[in-house]
Image (tube, coloured by chain):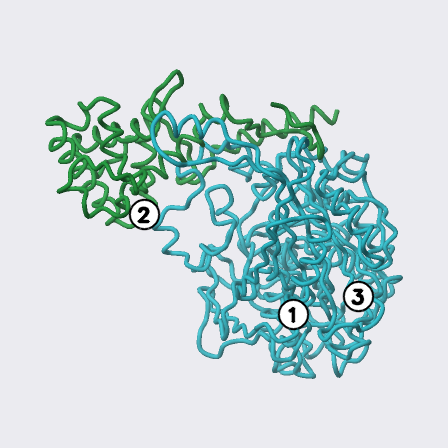
Amino acid sequence: MERRKVLKNISLAAGGLITLPAWAQGWNRSSLSFPSFLTPRQDDLLVALVDTIIPTTDTPGAKDLDIHLFVQKMITDCYEPEVQDNLANGLVRLEEMAQQSYNTSFTECSPVQREALLTPWVTPLTPALPSEDLMASEAEPPAFFTLVKELTIRGYMTSEYVMTHHTDYTMVPGHFRGCVPVTA
Amino acid sequence: MANLAIDAAKKMTYDAIVIGSGISGGWAAKELAEQGLKTLVLERGRDVKHIRDYPTANKHPWEFAHRGEMPIEVRQQNPLGSRKGLFNEATAHFVVKDAEQPYIQDKPFDWTRGYQVGGKSLLWARQTQRWSDFDFEGPARDGYAVDWPIRYKDLAPWYSHVEKFAGISGNRDGIPQLPDGEFLPATEMSCIDAHFQTQIAKHYQDRQLIQGRCAHITEPQPIHIEQGRAKCMHRTLCSRGCPLGGYFCSNSSTLPWAEKTGNLTIRPHSVVHSIIYSNWKKRAVGVRVIDAQTNKMMKFKARIIFVNASALNSNLILLNSTSHRFPNGLGNDNGLLGKYIAWHNYRGRISAEYDGLPDYTTDGRTPNHSYIPRFRNVHRQETDFLRGYAAGFGGGRRKNRSEEGIGAQLKNKLLNPELGPWGVTAWMMGEVIPKESNQVSLDTEHIDPYGIPQLRISADWDENDDKMVQDYHEQFTEMFTLAGFTNIQTRDSHHAPGSDIHEMGGVRMGKDPKSSLLNEWNQLHACRNVFVTDGACMTSTGTQNPSLTYMALTARAAYHAVEELKKRNL
């Protein structure tokens, strides 16, 4: 009796989802076709950037999980408008760096080349700079890169794929045990 | 035609009106409707039906468009709302938007409100501790505030009454300053909590750590199953609304129970303007309501009125209920209405790490935590500040996730976090002394969107609160050190009052009409058919989470109201 009531309640709650306010709607590739503040070219650069931060290995990376769309969605809705310009300009700058260092587009660079371009921003103390002219003044990573990295990690770690395959996420644990042995 | 007019008048006339549908209003509705009174519950916000109106209850983290974060446009429209922890994609629909009810802050005050059917009972911390006579006798002992007109024995049977129905889990700990209740089995304690419990017992005679007592059903009784509520499944997504009814709230419990009697009418979108007093009948005869959807004023009549609008709003309504007899607000003959506001002091926090128990961790999630009952100034005044504090305590092991680097290396670190040491936190819940200077009043110039004067709030910390935070940090640093905790960090948030949420007083109970507003049954001394049983009635604040006491006071007052009606005294 009790169980039946519970099941009924849960299914009722699922039915309640149709009353969701617009901002609470779930998103997927199709619902994310919002007007982009990036040009198609900049969009490609962002895809390559998130793919460099969390690449495809034997498991899906940020690009495979559409994290670039999440990054754009966040910057469109949750940040001041100037952050959008900052990202667009930053991507252009990244492209210039690739052209100067490797004579090709950032999107055409090999994974090793892309990581090398970003390394000074990741570990600012590294002395080997790919281009003295462009990078000499960079004591700290540019804000756009820090933000994209932060959002990429957030989007990746809270993605359905990672939460269901790699972290111990469960919506209904059903219990709490206060003292269990650590398993390796 | 004439008959239609009579029908219309009937629809506007009830035996009882309850203003507010939160934790205490829900109880008033249940008790009065069960006793056969045709009861109208007025709620200023929208309807929230159990389950149907919990839109985010079953959403996974990845189903939120911004993974919880609110869009900048909404944040900019709600600078006050944005300060609330609940202002995220999972629960923002239960946060009052700034434009709904502007108010004036003489001093910064982060007023926390819940305007929907169920009020803040959907959002509360669900900790439920009884008061003891050490709390009721505080004001009489040190002279701050007035003596309570009741003692523990007056409330004890009503605590039992509400506990059995609401479903409270806990242990019978036998602590004089925290009386035992009608408990369902306690939730499980973690090994770090058990370690701290043992260490405290070893080093102190006057201090205990117990498992928190909380309004979660751990073992449903027939009364809970009859309500359609089930065992808590440890989702810990409580403030989205619980589809299982695993914790107690008006929406899953008291309100549907009252509705089943056929005696209840709930009217959402009903902003109460004032209570109508009849000079001729010498009692309150009804309330004026602004319909939030049409902006039209309506009047509803009743023989008794329960004011459960949440502490500060109950003050606002009474202050705005002026008449020839009561030019300064209903029942306000002594000029004390709105004064002696107090709350709880949550400023102090202490956290640390523990390197012991490396081979153990926890599994699942708990909606509860441990609790350290008040140990300061219990039997006698022993410090240079008045009253005391309780504390919540919780701990667990975090997985340390490195976000260094980029590429495959970063990815590998993200997916393979290292299990860190035990982390522990304890937060204080201090008693704030009611003072006349902490008060609310009606502003004479500014009105809200419904034409009601804006509430002017003037409340601030004082030296007693500062000293209490300092003592809390000293005592807990010592307790943490003795327990072998390391990397101990104390923090005084110095936040503005209001985000502590537990505001109380302004319409305090007392023995003497010269120094209080309400009698021992929560009736206005000067207008006996008006009962105030939410936080506004509190003479002092204790250190316990207050909701359980509001519930017990409400059920007790409702019982008395019905008795008095039967005797034709009201």
The chain letter under disc 2 is: A
* Residue B303 in sight here: no
Q: Position of residue B467 (x, y in %)?
A: 65, 71
Residue identified by numbered label 1: B342
The chain letter under disc 3 is: B
Residue at the limit of the structure toward the top, as seen here: A58
Q: Is residue A104 above or below residue B483?
A: above
3 and 2 marks on the same chain: no
Q: Position of residue B450 (x, y in %)?
A: 47, 65
Q: Are marks 3 and 1 in contact (CB under 8 Å)?
A: no
Residue identified by numbered label 3: B135
The chain letter under disc 1 is: B
Q: Identify the secondary structure beneath mark 3.
A: helix
Q: Position of residue A162 (x, y in %)?
A: 46, 25
Give the distance between the C-alpha atoms of the residues marked 3 and 2, in whole angstroms: 48 Å
Rate crowding at label 3 as few (under 14), some (14 to 19) or many (20 or more) other CA atoms within 10 Å. Answer: many
Q: Is residue B61 above or below residue B98?
A: above
